[in-house]
Image (tube, rainbow, N blue to C red):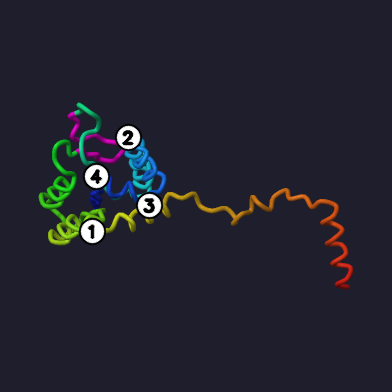
Amino acid sequence: MSSQVAIDGFNLIYKFPDLEESMYQNQLKKARQGLLELIELYSKKKKKQNFHVFFDGKKEIGSEVFQETFGKLNVYYSRDRKADDLIKEFVRTNIRPSEIQVVSSDKEIFFHAKKWGAHPISSEEFASIVSAEIAPPDAEPDAEEFKDKKLDPVEVEYWKNLFRKGR
């Protein structure tokens, strides 16, 4: 049984430091792309979930694109409306709101989701779940740092003396 995940795009962008940085540098497209790539990676591990990402405004100036796909993500642009309204509508008009997880830290969206029986989760929480899920598994902690470390002759002498004393 598959479930739906509705994501407040711009709300979530600000929870990933490098994407937030892009936003502050006015690199809207780069931030949006970065978010979609992260969620797309995450979605590959969550085969049973369908992802819907909602963004405020237009895809680009003059663009009338309302919906497109990005990998298996459904992406929506609110154009002249607010993305919040699209998310609320998505929940309200869904046959089974109880199967929708709504990702937003916007209080209004959060309450709306609850009211319709969906499951709200804050963007912060979702961001940390995504990060944990797609982070490369750690090798030995800092194993790299210890590889090929050569002691210089002074250090070698120091340790030799230390061990001799210990006997």
Please name whichever residue, 137 or 47, is drawn nearer the observer in this view of the structure: 137
For residue 137, side relative to residue 42 (left or right): right
Measure the C-alpha gap from mark 4 to mark 3: 15 Å
Q: What is the total number of numbered labels drawn onto the structure image?
A: 4
- Which numbered disc flags the more N-terminal residue, 4 or 2? 2
Q: Residue furthest front?
A: 25
Instruction: For the residues labelled 1 and 4, say whether their Cβ atoms are less than 8 Å apart.
Output: no
Question: For the point 30% across and 49% down, which residue is it?
Answer: 12
Dot 3 lies on which element? helix
Where is residue 122, by image quadrant? Answer: bottom left
| Amino acid type, residue under disc 3 in the picture | Val
Extreme bottom residue here?
167
**Is 146 located above or below residue 59 in the figure?**
below
* Amino acid type indicated by mark 1: Pro
Q: Amino acid at mark 4?
A: His
Residue at mark 1: 120
Position of the C terminus by quadrant: bottom right
- Residue ID at (25%, 30%): 60
First in sequence: mark 4 vs mark 3: 4
Q: CA distance from mark 2 to mark 1?
A: 26 Å
- Element under disc 2: helix
Could you say whether the residue bearing mark 1 is in a helix, strand or loop? strand
- Asked whether residue 97 is drawn in magenta, I would say no
- Earlier in the chain: of badge 3 and badge 2, it is 2
The numbered mark, 1 or 4, whose residue comes first in the sequence reads: 4
x, y percentage for residue 73? 28, 41
- In the picture of the structure, the residue carrying the numbered disc 3 is 130
Report the disc number at residue 29.
2
Q: Find residue 120 and report its horizontal and vertical position in percent.
A: 23, 58
Residue lying at 64% horizontally and 53% vertically, measured from the top left: 143
Bounds of the magenta segment: 64-77
